[in-house]
Amino acid sequence: MPDKAARHGRGKRSVRSKGRRSGRTSLPVAERQSQVSQVTGSVSRPKASVPALSAATSIAETRKRYAYVPYEMRTIGILSGIVIVILVVLALVLS
């Protein structure tokens, strides 16, 4: 009995390789490098400016900005303590 793939005009391997399916032709390495250098040469880097703040202003802004952190840390501590207590109790009960 003939193979099903042969009946449909396809063999086990396709005529075109997987790498060439996109239809692009590969450029030599020297041409690709020259194209990359042309593109990167014309790109300018943005310059970032940092505003000058006094130490007192930045500390006050930081405290206001992260006011929730102490409460979150307390919650994390309480939950981790509960987990440790549960683990100790389980270790004692199961041993």
Image (spheres, helix red, strand yellow):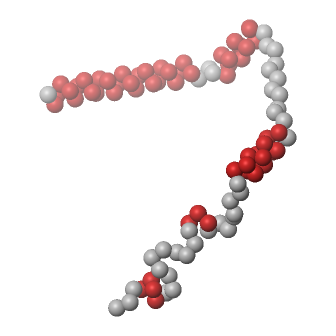
Residue at 63% over, 21% down: 66
* Residue drawn at the location 78% of the way across and 46% of the way down: 34
Position of the C terminus, as image quadrant, is top left
- The answer to whether 47 appears left or right of 28 in the picture is right
Horizontal and vertical percent position of residue 29:
69, 50
Q: Position of residue 31 (x, y in %)?
A: 75, 51
Q: The N terminus is located in which quarter?
A: bottom left
**Residue at left 85%, top 40%?**
42
For this rendering, which residue is in front, 40 or 74?
40
Q: Residue furthest bottom?
A: 1
Residue under the image location 36 percent in, 22 percent down: 81
Image height of 86 relative to 13, above or below? above
Q: Which residue lies furthest to the left in this view?
A: 95
| Residue 55 in picture, x, y percent from top left | 74, 8
72 or 15: which is nearer to us?
15
Say above or below: 43 vs 25.
Answer: above
Above or below for 37 versus 54? below
Q: Nearer the viewer, residue 72 or 12?
A: 12
Q: Is residue 41 left or right of residue 72?
A: right
Q: How many labels does the image show?
A: 0
